Amino acid sequence: MTVKGFYDLLRPELPAAAGTCVVAGELLGLGHLPSAIQLILGFLAGFFISGSEMVFNDYFDIEVDKVNSPGRPLPSNRVTPGEAAIFACALTAAGFVASAILSLVSIALIALVWVVGFLYNWRFKEAGLLGNLMVSFSVAMTFVFGGVGVTGLANGVVLVFGASAFTFDLSEEISSGVMDAEGDEVRSVKSLARVKGRAFAMRVSGLLLALFIALSLVPYLTGWLGMAYLVMVVVVDLAIAALGVSLVRSKTTKEGRKRGRQLYITLTLFIAALIVSRFLFP
């Protein structure tokens, strides 16, 4: 057992992105800055629940990771399965506590997200596209969770951001299926890449990124967000378009994983910039 092993198991940049999306949902739902306690609790709820899903993913994927990622904490024996299970349960409990303090509706939503995520990791990863849809639903719910958690209902801009997150993540899930095709044979995962072929899966992934770019313009076109948002989103869309083309054309698994990671980092930076802009221009 090592601290580095648990750090790698958690992959904190992804839970941090989930927490950031929750905060963005709060901002979009309220139309102004949330209170400090709402901001902190929303971020922590998203971080801990997403973190638990990361750990459970590795817990149920030990055999697959022995092929795809033998250096991961569990297949490399840096963390034992028992330690990983305890860690995942602790993260889950922390996420539920933060959600319960935020609001009653928050605990109901986070419970739904956690159940969907757990079922995916436990049983539905092999289902291919259905599993991809479950993961993308969980990602989209970060915005909805943030908006509904502080207002009690979801407005149009929150739902559009949720839909954008859904299409972006579904694109990444499908392209990841291409990168993981060899290891997915161990678990008989019916990914789009294994069912329809690599080229078809990458085309679908590219089309979903194009849909994401179209959806990202809706908040400006409807007047929900102003010129500052348009400037930011155009820059981000250009970067995502370039990275998306590189992803579709990637020749190796290593290159594809690199482009996928760059896409997520770009989107996370955009969401962080959206939050900062709200602080500067409330």
Image: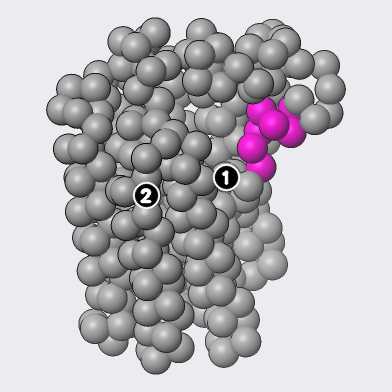
Residue lying furthest front: 251
| 84 within the magenta span | no
Q: Amino acid at mark 2?
A: Leu
Q: Position of residue 102 (x, y in %)?
A: 59, 52
The circle drawn on residue 223 is none
Quadrant of the image for the C terminus?
bottom right
- Seen from the viewer's position, the closer of residues 52 and 267 is 267
- The residue that label 1 is drawn on is 14
Q: CA distance from mark 2 to mark 1?
A: 19 Å
Q: Position of residue 148 (x, y in %)?
A: 42, 57
Q: Secondary structure at mark 2?
A: helix
Residue at 60%, 25% in the rendered image: 55
Please indicate whether residue 74 sits to the left or right of residue 232 in the image.
right
Q: Is residue 254 visible?
A: yes
- The residue that label 2 is drawn on is 247
Q: Nearer the viewer, mark 2 or mark 1?
A: 2
| 10 within the magenta span | yes
Residue at 28%, 86% in the rendered image: 223
The magenta-colored residue range is 6-12
User: Sequence order check: which comes first, mark 2 or mark 1?
Assistant: 1
